[in-house]
Image (cartoon, rainbow, N blue to C red):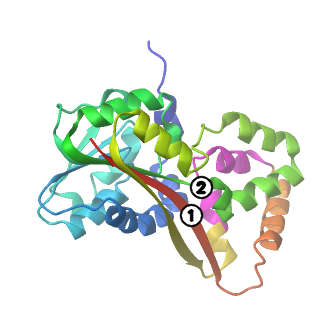
């Protein structure tokens, strides 16, 4: 028997993933599409499509576009296939290191919030270029995790309650791009031209702290999995410290997150 795909195992809980990250990605998706400068009528490929928030936004904005989603996690794809907005989309199981598509099939090859999951960035970019037509756009974005207040507050709280658990988060976290310069260097190093960067700010409002907290207990990231493994008393202490950090005072809580975006032409 072969080894289990760690990405597939990590994202086996589609409902938990959507509850935690879905609201953020749904807000980010239309802004990322605008950054990618898409024109209707082309073929849009979403790599690491997950439960397909980006494709849903594309289906609404570009009714004549051909939509293709690729993801290695069967559980996320199964949920995506149930979405009525994607009746005209093609959803395929596969990883970015071996995309199950022909050469030069895409006008726009996109990836939303999964750059940090690419174990071999050079190979991933080579594959993205392979499936993109000459002159087509290759674009991606990743959270600036230092400017993601929920994650920052959660990790800080866990560290103050259980330092050993916080160390395990760092050990199990994927390698993320740290800044725009690193993203731009990667894109140019892959042979892409007309490379541009931007920052995209997303805001969400949580009516109560419970609305923010509950999805954290079912998430599928290193920090949320660590939270779920803590004892109930430790979880309550983490919650209390997060409330203090985020200055929750019983009123709706408005939070902003920043994503680093990059695009280039094949």
Q: Is residue 217 magenta?
A: yes
> Marks 2 and 1, Cα distance to the nearest angstrom?
6 Å
The residue furthest front is: 194
Q: Position of residue 13 (x, y in %)?
A: 49, 47
Instruction: Report helix, strand or loop for mark 2.
Output: loop
Q: Position of residue 116 (x, y in %)?
A: 53, 41
Give 228 or 127, whichever is nearer the viewer: 127
Indicate left or right for 65 with 204 as reference. Answer: left
Main SS of residues in magenta: helix
The residue labelled by disc 1 is 258
Indicate left or right for 189 with 55 as reference. Answer: right
**Residue occupying image coordinates x 43% and y 33%:** 189
**Residue occupying image coordinates x 64% and y 58%:** 216
Q: Is residue 141 visible?
A: yes
Range of residues picked out in magenta: 213-230
Q: Position of residue 79 (x, y in %)?
A: 35, 52
Label located before the other in sequence (2 or 1) = 2
The residue labelled by disc 2 is 144
Q: How many marks?
A: 2
């Amino acid at each position: 028997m072969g080894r289990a795909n760690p990405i597939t195992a990590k994202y086996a809980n589609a409902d938990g993933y959507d509850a935690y990250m879905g609201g953020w990605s749904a807000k980010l998706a239309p802004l990322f599409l605008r950054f990618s400068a898409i024109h209707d009528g082309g073929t849009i490929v979403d790599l690491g499509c997950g439960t397909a928030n980006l494709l849903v936004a594309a289906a609404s904005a570009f009714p004549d576009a051909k939509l293709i989603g690729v993801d290695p996690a069967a559980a996320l794809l199964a949920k995506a296939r149930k979405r009525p907005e994607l009746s005209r989309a093609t959803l395929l199981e596969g990883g970015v290191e071996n995309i199950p598509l022909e050469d030069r099939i895409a006008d726009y090859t996109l990836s939303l919030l999964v750059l940090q999951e690419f174990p071999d960035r050079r190979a991933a970019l080579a594959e993205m270029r392979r499936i993109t037509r000459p002159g087509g756009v290759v674009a991606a974005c990743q959270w600036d995790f230092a400017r993601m207040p929920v994650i920052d507050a959660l990790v800080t709280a866990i560290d103050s309650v259980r330092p050993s658990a916080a160390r395990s988060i760092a050990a199990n976290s994927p390698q993320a791009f740290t800044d725009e310069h690193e993203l731009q260097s990667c894109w140019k190093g892959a042979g892409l031209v007309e490379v541009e960067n931007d920052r995209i700010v997303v805001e969400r409002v949580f009516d109560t702290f419970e609305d923010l907290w509950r999805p954290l207990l079912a998430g599928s990231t290193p920090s949320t999995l660590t939270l779920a493994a803590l004892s109930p008393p430790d979880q309550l202490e983490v919650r209390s410290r997060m409330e203090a950090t985020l200055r929750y005072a019983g009123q709706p809580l408005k939070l902003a997150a920043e994503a680093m975006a990059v695009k280039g032409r094949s």
